[in-house]
Amino acid sequence: MKKINSFFLLLASLLLLGGCSLSVGKKADQTDNWTAIQKRGTVTIGLDDTFVPMGYRQKNGQLAGYDIDLATAFFKLYGIKPSFQTIDWSMNATELKNGTIDLIWNGFTKTPEREAKVAFSKTYLSNDQVLVSLKKNHIDSYADMQGKVLGAQTGSSGSNDINKYPKLLKNRIKDHEPVLYESFTNAFIDLTSGRIQGLLIDSSYADYYVAHQKNPQDFQMIRGAFPKEAFGVGMRFSDHTLKQKINQGLDQLAKNGTLDKINQKWFGDKADSPLLK
């Protein structure tokens, strides 16, 4: 009898261990992770921490930015603490799939290419591409960039649009290719010094960067014919509940005045948020 009981105890132990290994081995992109996020009380958000003003490191090393404030306000609704993790931006979809991060909340533009890899929330901020130049260079239209040097950020929506709509700028500029920068900070240094004559940049960032230049009155911004862009939160396709919660939470922040308060803090009256219309 003892032998039989021992056998069943051993069998039960093996099944239990097997069940645990199946649970641990289940991939993040095959799971609706909301319950697990709630249980642990934290969520990991991937970002580029040089992306002023959406999410960036201040001189003291602390994170600040529009999306930092918005994500923090959102997860406060659910009693969850956000943890922000710097990621390789070219690997953002992979970071989501393997579970390194739970979300991408960092001025993440919706594009067909990204929508094939990532599920998006509703749009919380709309954006235009603008051409920033020095007034003294008399660049009053895209046509005035003929033969001149254009700058853009590597991997940005602007650099993609330059190639996607070549008639607007690519075919006009010197060498038919922009000078690419890792950060807009360096791009503005070159623009001010005359190494480039124009900079294609998201309007959300342009307003912030120009306002923080030594002489902001020396700059001008020109809107062209590039399509309007939409910022959303990126997540795994399997996270149906998380997507639902984010969409509901964004609506709640819009209704209770929090979204408008954050917009005013970072962009003044220039923020274009569809949730407030």
Image (cartoon, rainbow, N blue to C red):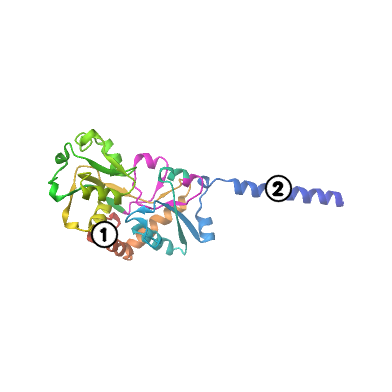
Q: Can I make out residue 202 in this image?
A: no
Residue 27, placed above or below residue 208: above
Quadrant of the image occupied by residue 180: top left
Where residue 249 appears, as percent x and y from the top left, is 39, 59
- Tell me which secondary structure the magenta stretch mostly adopts: loop
In this rendered view, identify the residue nearer to me: 167 or 192. Answer: 192
Left or right of residue 70: residue 42: right
Is 97 included in the stretch rendered in magenta? yes
Residue drawn at x 53%, y 56% as measured from the top left? 36
Pointers 1 and 2 in contact (CB under 8 A)?
Answer: no
Where residue 221 appears, as percent x and y from the top left, is 18, 50
Is 112 included in the stretch rendered in magenta? yes
**Disc assigned to residue 105:** none
Residue drawn at x 68%, y 46% as measured from the top left? 18
Q: CA distance from mark 1 to mark 2?
A: 57 Å
Q: Which residue is tagged 1?
A: 267
**Disc assigned to residue 15:** 2
Q: Residues within 10 Å of mark 1 (few under 14, many from 20)?
A: some
Quadrant of the image occupied by residue 155: top left
Q: Amino acid at mark 2?
A: Leu
* Residue at the limit of the structure toward the right, as seen here: 1
Where residue 239 appears, as percent x and y from the top left, is 47, 49
Left or right of residue 113: residue 277: left
Q: Amino acid at mark 1?
A: Phe
Q: Can I make out residue 255 in this image?
A: yes
Residue range (magenta): 95-124
| Secondary structure category for the residue under label 1 | helix
Where residue 164 appears, as percent x and y from the top left, is 28, 36
Quarter placement of the C terminus = bottom left
Left or right of residue 253: residue 135: left
In this rendered view, identify the residue nearer to me: 221 or 35. Answer: 221
Residue drawn at x 28%, y 56% as measured from the top left? 273
